[in-house]
Image (tube, helix red, strand yellow):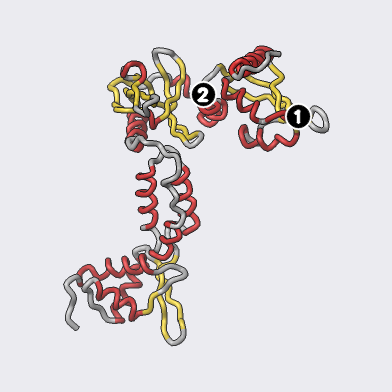
Amino acid sequence: MPKGKNQKFKLYYLMKIMLEKTDDAHSLTMPEILESLAAYDVTAERKSIYTDLEALGRLGVEIVSEPVGKTYEYHVAGRHFELAELKLLVDAIQSSKFITAKKSNELIKKLEDLVSEHEAKELQRQVYVSGRIKTMNESIYYNVDAIYNAIAENKKILFQYFQWNIQKEMELRHGGAYYDISPWGLSWDNENYYLIGYDTEARIIKHYRVDKMLHIKMSDEEREGREFFERFDMAAYTRKSFGMFGGEERQVKLLMDNTLAGVIIDRFGKDTMMIPVDEEHFSVHIDVAVSQQFIGWVFALGSGARIIGPKDVVQQVNQEIKRLMEQYNLKSF
């Protein structure tokens, strides 16, 4: 039998065929394997294929042979990712606001390469990215990489920060001046990536939307603020900062309907102590950054939630109610 032009790539093409065309629900017979190899200009005999399939097993590509009637069929088993796991990753990519629509499709396409062409169709059917609200800043992936590099090198970073104006254009904040921040971590909250860092000039911890950062540069200066982050709980910081809006951190007491116990657990965790007040209510103390966003969160829970302490925070709530009434031309109380 004359050898094909790509004979020296025989094992590679055999692996490619098995990975692309087979899975737990789809197999190939030996004639089909030989035919697929021939399409790559590779000729082979049955005996050599048996040896090659064993070699693939030693390389980590598990091939299973199963009797079907009077013949055998072969397929890849035990891939690194199960189809259900990849579907979860696809859903995470799709729903991530900070990943652009273009990058979402690129990432999902790469995930499809991890399964057979048959299973890839199931991933493709889940792609509904175009209608989702996505960031428009393509540089976010490089921003994240630059921030992690600075953290690894223990260096400050310089960057410009922008906001959108009414013309839907990027408008640099602080007149285009560079921010000088010591990066200490990244947090993902409410579908957005945030840099958590130390502002030397203000001497406080601040956070910034990564997709609104431009022209990140690593500074020659070493990071500052280590003493603030030695016992810093990134997850707790995110829980306290509603919508990542800042405010004075306080311990606030809430009176809640029992039906809202799940809301407290979902937001603050199962370790939060909920004290029964009567048969229908409980009270809870939570550490939060008191802001309009936090007060608005409590308002959104309706009549089943009320801030009852401390007094100055209750006063802030009353001021916010008055502001809303004035804003909507309602009679003051």
Residue 156 makes an appearance in the image: no
Q: Residue at x 30, y 70 (%)?
A: 14
Separation (CA) of disc 1 from disc 2: 27 Å
Query: Where does label 1 land, which residue?
Result: 282
**For residue 117, which quarter of the picture?**
bottom left
Instruction: Please state if 239 lies on the left or on the right of 226 as rendered.
Output: right
Say which element carries label 2.
Answer: loop
Tell me: 152 left or right of 328: left
> Residue 25 placed where, x, y %?
47, 70
**Residue 275 as seen in the image, left or right of residue 220:** right
Q: Is residue 51 above or below residue 324?
A: below
Query: Which of the 4 image quadrants contains residue 45?
Result: bottom left
Query: Residue 99 in the image: x percent, y percent?
Result: 40, 40
Query: Which residue type does callout 2 highlight?
Result: Phe
Is 290 or 325 nearer to us in this picture?
A: 325
Residue 245 is tagged as 2
Q: Are marks 1 and 2 in contact (CB under 8 Å)?
A: no
| Vertical relation: 307 (above or below) 81 | above
Image location of residue 42, percent across then percent down: 22, 74
Residue 89 sits above or below residue 199 on the image: below
Question: Which sits in the foreground, 20 or 12?
Answer: 20
